[in-house]
Amino acid sequence: MEKSFCPCGCEAASEKKIVVEYLYLDLETCDRCIGTEKVLDEVMMALTPALNTAGFKVEYNKIQMKTAEIAAQYRFLSSPTIRVNGYDICQSVAENSCGCCSDISGADVNCRVFEYNGETYKIPLKEMLAETILESVFGQVEPGCSCGEYELPENLKEFYEGKKNKSSCSCGGKCC
């Protein structure tokens, strides 16, 4: 099987292998991350058997962006993020205030919202994820490359710095 390359020249996954990555900040407190995980799990449970039947090998990974270093390694732009073969399924990053992640870090943090059919959702709809993943697999969407120039977004810098400061506080973050 031939290797393919994304527009920036990096090697993309082979045609018959699908790697779905769920990148998130927190699965203990953040309603958005928890809700998105639940919906994505359901969609992957439905899609994987059909994709396997069609001859695709499906790999589903969940990766917590625990530190700024991990976020930089994955070129993480916003939480939560879903990628198919390295490409973000969302064409752009739209965000609004996330009280959960703000509480975790003690800083005002914005997290991703999902836009679908002219509406905005904090947690994506099943049909939105299924449609977008299938479009990504079958090439009906021009994917956005996630491997070019990267700088950790200011919003995430504040999250990680606030989280670090909060955890080093003598009260364990209870007074902050």
Image: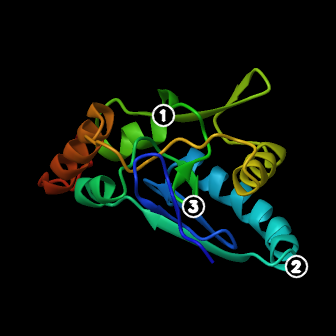
Viewport quadrant of the N terminus: bottom right
Q: Is residue 170 left or right of residue 83?
A: left
Find residue 147 and report its horizontal and vertical position in percent. 38, 51
Foreground mark, 3 or 1, reads: 3
Q: Quadrant of residue 21?
A: bottom right
Mark identifier at residue 85: 3
Sooner in the amino-acid sequence: mark 3 or mark 2:
2
Mark identifier at residue 34: none
Foreground mark, 1 or 2, reads: 2
How many residues crowd mark 3 within 10 Å: few (<14), some (14–19), many (20+)? many
In front of the other: 62 or 10: 10
Q: CA distance from mark 1 to mark 2?
A: 39 Å
Find residue 38 and report its horizontal and vertical position in percent. 70, 59
Identify which residue is drawn at 13% across, 55% down: 168
Q: CA distance from mark 3 to mark 1?
A: 27 Å
Q: Is residue 126 left or right of residue 113?
A: right
Find residue 61 and report its horizontal and vertical position in percent. 55, 71
Report the number of discs. 3
Identify which residue is drawn at 76% across, 48% down: 135
Q: Is residue 81 left or right of residue 141?
A: left
Identify which residue is drawn at 67% across, 41% down: 123
Residue ID for mark 1: 98
Sooner in the amino-acid sequence: mark 3 or mark 1:
3
Residue ID for mark 2: 53
